[in-house]
Amino acid sequence: MPTNSLTPVPDDGRRELPHDVVVITAHPQMEHSRVNRRLMRAARKPRPDGQPSSVIVRDLYSLYPDYLIDVPAEQALIVDAKLIVWQHPIQWYSMPALMKLWVDDVLAFGWAYGPGGTALRGKDLWLVATTGGPQESYHPSSYNRYFFDAFLPPYEQTATLCGMRFLPPLVLHGAHKADDAAILAHLKIYIDRLHRYPEWPELNELLYKLPDVVPEDARPEDEEEEEEEKKEEDQRQRQEAA
């Protein structure tokens, strides 16, 4: 089935300040991006109605060009958020490398999932993505072979394991060739959604799922310590050999 499409939320006059929103954006060449750069900049702008914005934007490739992620800082930001947005281009049917490292490091065992890992429970996760290929290329009869939805289970399961609700993604296909009208329409939906969250009509129909229980021995501490000690020993030997 094709990717769900989102439409702007109608203005019914019942607006409230949004809950805290953290946008985690990752593009290896943001300066050359046609769409993701405009999405990031738009998210950083003040609200069009003049009310205070609670949207925080984290440009990972700008913050961590050395790939050394400040895990406590990232966790401190998202633990207070209600909505976490992952905004990035789709690369090889997945997320960019630094975004994947962010997921590996920040969504830690015992913090985001597993025994005692309840820091993100009850939050929402929203994927805002772009693809190079047009929408028709995500079809069994075309070169990407599958509908785009077929590549979403890792995102949805990550959200579910952490006790988060996975919201319908916002995807712009064919970003390389999209005209200004299509990009502007996409931007309007994106910003409208950011500033009106959680007042999205479809949210009332989306339920939170309790994550499956992850046993304590799924990540034995002794094995983790041994692995860390091995890394330190390998590093020491390389330094001595240098």
Image (cartoon, rainbow, N blue to C red):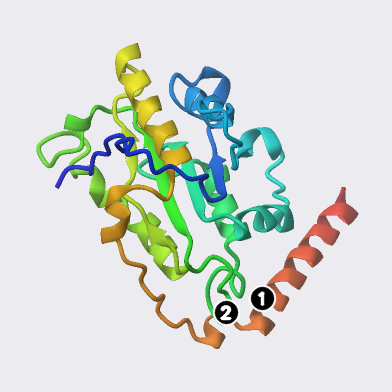
Residue nearest the observer in this picture, 65 or 1: 1
Say left or right for 117 vs 187. right
In front: 44, or 155? 44
Q: Are marks 2 and 1 in contact (CB under 8 Å)?
A: yes
Please tell me whether residue 8 is drawn above or below residue 182 in the rendered image: below
| Residue 108 position in % (x across, y down) | 60, 66
Q: Give the numbered dot on residue 136.
A: none
Q: Secondary structure at mark 2?
A: loop
State the residue position of label 1. Answer: 224
Q: Is residue 150 visible?
A: yes
Q: Residue at 30% x, 59% y: name it.
A: 204
Residue 28 location, quadrant: top right
Count numbered badges in the picture.
2
Q: Is residue 65 visible?
A: no
Q: Position of residue 237 (x, y in %)?
A: 83, 60
Real-space CA distance between mark 2 and mark 1, rounded to the nearest whole angstrom: 7 Å
The amino acid on which the numbered mark 1 sits, given as a three-letter code, is Glu
Q: Residue at x 48, y 45 (%)?
A: 16
Furthest residue to the top? 180
The image shows residue 72 at horizontal and vertical percentages of 73, 58
Residue 54 lies, with reference to residue 70, above or below; the image says: above
Crowding at dot 2, Cα within 10 Å, few <14 / some 14-19 / many 20+, comes out as few
Comes first in the chain, label 2 or label 1: 2
Residue located beneath label 2 in the image: 219
Mark 1, residues whose alpha carbon is within 10 Å: few (<14), some, or many (≥20)?
few
Up-down relation of residue 34 to residue 46 (above or below): above
